[in-house]
Image (cartoon, grey):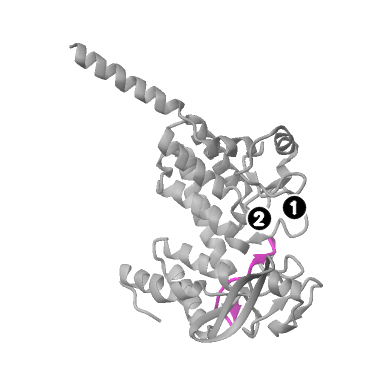
Amino acid sequence: MKTKLYLLTLGLAAVNFSAQTKDTLAEKIMIYQLPIGGWGKQLEDKSVVNYNLPLNKELLRKIKATGDDHATIDNNATSREINALIKAYSVTKNPEYLKSAEKGISYLLQMQYKNNGGFPQYYPNKGLYRKQITYNDNAMINALTVLYNVAEGKNGFDVVDAKLKEKSKTAVQKGIECILRTQVLQKNIPVIWGDQYNEETLQPDKARAFEPVSLATAESVGIVRFLMMQPVTPEIEKSVKSAIKWFRQNKIEGYSYEVSKVNGKAVRTLAEDKNSVIWARFYDINNNKPLFGDRDGSVKYNYYEVSEERRNGYSWYVDYAEKLLGKEYPKWLEKNSISDL
């Protein structure tokens, strides 16, 4: 009997200890969380959010001074923190982590455009391009992936409040509808997607000076991957296959794109390589020619005409579609018993 009581006491103590366990990263994340529920990528002085920094008095002052207008889904902000909090909760069972994550999820639901299902880059800040529906740097797809995990109870998100799950299901469906509506048409044929869209007209739009209206390959790979996670519908099948066809037709064979450091600075080199396949980051939305934007807002069709600062300060070629075409798409076809194009 004494042994049983001892084991019971030990078990209760272990549960209590687990509930009080703290995760250093999660604790910092909660401090950085903005009142509206999201997180910023920068603080009020434009310094980048860095969870590796010690929380000294000056940093805490800057965090406190950072307002809701900094809340964003750009550069993985907010989705990164929600994922980390859910992971920390799964280990520690600290209820504060789940509460903070749910507040972040509520922020994502709040920022989604109710009339079209898109996500702005920032919310509530509507300045400049921040209100545009933003696929750039996978912003909208990151947000939708979090909500998809909530809706489906995947990747540790099964612990989230049931009301948020139902809202997330609706949000994901509206997001998919937006994705399908914003796929660019060329002569009425769907191709891939732009980086950002006007939130009212749903037409591709420009953002920063060097990000012109264009087809965006890196972001389109992420969009296709998200669509392939969903139950197959005729609309999704058509969308995925159309994008795959475009990627196949517009690959650049025989070149590689490498980044190296010279005197501490990034140097990006486009070089001949018979074994390599790449895609330009941006293509002309009408004729599929690779294009490049510059700081002055000009658009170039020759990579070497781009200013040196922008040529070495931006990734103008990518190879993300290679894995999509070679491995992920064939697996998706096989899994769903779908024939190729």
Residue drawn at 50 percent across, 50 percent down: 146
Three-letter amino acid code at the position of disc 2: Pro
Q: Is residue 265 left or right of residue 101?
A: right
Q: Secondary structure at mark 2?
A: loop
Farthest residue in the left direction?
1
Above or below residue 35? Residue 306 is: below
Quarter of the image that includes the N terminus: top left
- CA separation, marks 2 and 1? 8 Å
Residue drawn at 66 percent across, 36 percent down: 35
Residue 46 image point, x, y percent: 75, 49
Farthest residue in the front direction?
263
Please tell me the numbered disc located at residue 67.
Answer: none
Quarter of the image that includes the C terminus: bottom left
Secondary structure that dominates the magenta span = loop
Mark 1 Cα within 10 Å, few/some/many (few <14, many 20+)?
Answer: few
Segment colored magenta:
185-200
Q: Quadrant of residue 335?
A: bottom left
196 in magenta = yes
Q: Is residue 304 left or right of residue 189?
A: right
Residue 95 image point, x, y percent: 48, 30
The answer to whether marks 2 and 1 mark residues whose Cβ atoms lie closer than 8 Å is yes
Residue drawn at 50 percent across, 46 percent down: 83
Q: Is residue 30 or residue 234 the one in the foreground?
A: 30
Q: Is residue 209 left or right of residue 204?
A: right
Please tell me the numbered disc located at residue 120.
Answer: 2
Residue drawn at 57 percent across, 38 percent down: 103
Above or below residue 200? Residue 259 is: below
Q: Secondary structure at mark 1?
A: loop
Please tell me the numbered disc located at residue 126.
Answer: 1
Q: Is residue 127 or residue 10 the one in the foreground?
A: 10
**Residue 189 visible in the snapshot:** no
Residue 254 image point, x, y percent: 52, 87
